[in-house]
Each structure stands twice: as structure tokens, then as C-alpha cells.
Amino acid sequence: MLAAFPNTPAVYMCHDHKVWFDSPPPLQSIRKYIAVDCYVRERIVEEIGCASDAVAVIHNGVNLGKFRRKEHILEKSRRALLFVSEAPHLRHVECVRAACKRLAIPLDEIGPAVKNRVAQPEILLPQYDIVFGKARCAMEAMACGCAVVLVGPEGIGAMVVPEQFDMMRLRNFGRSLLRPQFDENLLVSEVRRYDAAAVAKVCELTRAHCGTNLMVDAFCRLYMEVLQEGRTISHSPDTLAAYFGRLAENIRLERAILEQPPESSRKRKKRWWK
């Protein structure tokens, strides 16, 4: 669609560092590329060949009216929640289960990865003291006043603490902060860092800097800048042809996987996360 209207200004936002269908297109009509965090910005810089400061970073936001801060943050953690999206394996889930069992902390699980989708996580989150998750799941939990230990199918990360909040925010509390290992000892050590005062401070920082209102304001400012700039970015036909060629090949591979028998569905999940 954008390729057909090269003189119509557009922006493109990339949300993921790896998946093929989020690859930034080298289209003339795109006057500004946006990354969800600094890690994703690296992908745009590499694939488009532009300077790092030419890519805007607009972080994900939390609906603070929906995800409200709970009334009390306990001095000692009593309940834990695993809050995970779709994943190609369950090693991180098993690791969290083992760590909570060792610590004698009751654990509940929600999210597509554990086949327990919930329509209103904002109602559940304030009931827990510690939440295991990453990215948007982590931010929503922090906004409610939960301690968060970063966990995902890519590995295990640290508990979010006030001293590291700004650095982790730049990385969207996401996969680039996870170490590629699944060691319950690491999780046990992180859970033991629980401190009510630190949890409250992280909650305050989240609510001050991660609201959707700030995200929307950033997008509006960027749209105005693009409209006022009035220029286009030139890309050669060869570059565009190569981009569409890569997309076509990935679509062909995905279609072939989808057409395989049901017992081969696991292969599809593995490829999706490459």
C-alpha cells in the first residue's frame, strides 16, 4: 500500500528485534522509523542502513486508569504470578515453578503460554506480590505495585529495582535483558531481593514515566514533525525488490509449515521465534 503512494508521508514502527514480519521496509514514503526500544532500534539501523539518531524510540505504555495501584505493598512476598505470552517452549515456566516451590511461595499462572488466557489481568495483578514476566506484562504488573522478575522464553533476567529502572526502560523490560539460561538458583536469588520500599518506588517510576498518555503525546509530536518536514527518503528499486523477495520467501516457508499435519505444529512455533 505505501509503495503505491511514495509522496504520502508515513511512519513505520518496529516492535520486535527478530521476527521476519516486523522487518522495516525501505519505502520512499516512510519519513521516520520508530522503534519500541533501543534494542529494536539496532535492527532498524542495521537493516535500513541509517544512523542511530535517525530512528525515534517510543516505548510501550500502560493504561494507568485501567491498571491501578493496589492499596498495600506487603513487607514480605506471599503470592506470585507467572504472566507470560505465547512461547515456543516452557523451560522458563518450569524454572519459575521450581523456584517458587523451593521458596514455598504459592504460584498462579496466566497467559497463552500456559493455556490460561484472562480477559482482565488488571483485576488479578493487584492480588500478587511478585510477578514473573517481561515487556508489557512486566510494566502492567509494576504499575499495580507488584515486584517484577524479568522472565521469558529467551531466558532469565533480574528483578526490576529503582537503580536500574531507567536502563531497563530503554530496553522495554524485554528480551535483551534476559540471560539465555534457565537456572532456578538465579530466580531464587532475585526473588529474595524483594523489598517493599523498592517495589513502591518502582511503582511510582512506572506510573510517572510509562503511561499511555506519554506514549500518545510522543506519537503526536512525531507526526507533526514528519508533516512539517515535508521530505522523502529515497531507496533504490534494487533495495525494495530485495526486501519484497525476503518477505515472499518467508511467507512461502510459513505457508508450507501451516500446511503440514497437526503433529508438526511445534516446528512452526520454533521457526516463529527465530
Image (cartoon, rainbow, N blue to C red):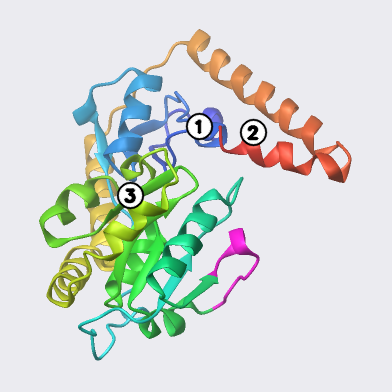
> Magenta region: which residues?
110-119
Determine the residue positioned at 44% across, 72% down. 81
Instruction: Residue under label 1, please give it.
Output: 5
Disc 1 crowd rating (10 Å Cα; few below 14, some 14-19, many 20+) is few
Residue 163 place in picture, x, y as percent = 10, 56
Label 3 amino acid?
Gly
Query: Of label 3 and label 2, which has the lower sequence position?
Result: 3
Instruction: Residue under label 2, please give it.
Output: 271
Query: Of label 2 and label 1, which has the lower sequence position?
Result: 1
Residue 86, picture quadrant: bottom right
* Residue 71 within the segment the image draws in magenta: no
Disc 3 crowd rating (10 Å Cα; few below 14, some 14-19, many 20+) is many
- Residue 41 in view in this figure: yes
Reply above or below: 274 against 74. Answer: above
Q: Secondary structure at mark 3?
A: strand
Task: State the separation of the CA atoms marked 1 and 3.
Answer: 43 Å
Horizontal arrangement in the rendering, residue 259 relative to residue 156 (left or right): right
Reply above or below: 169 against 237. Answer: below
Instruction: Residue under label 3, please give it.
Output: 157
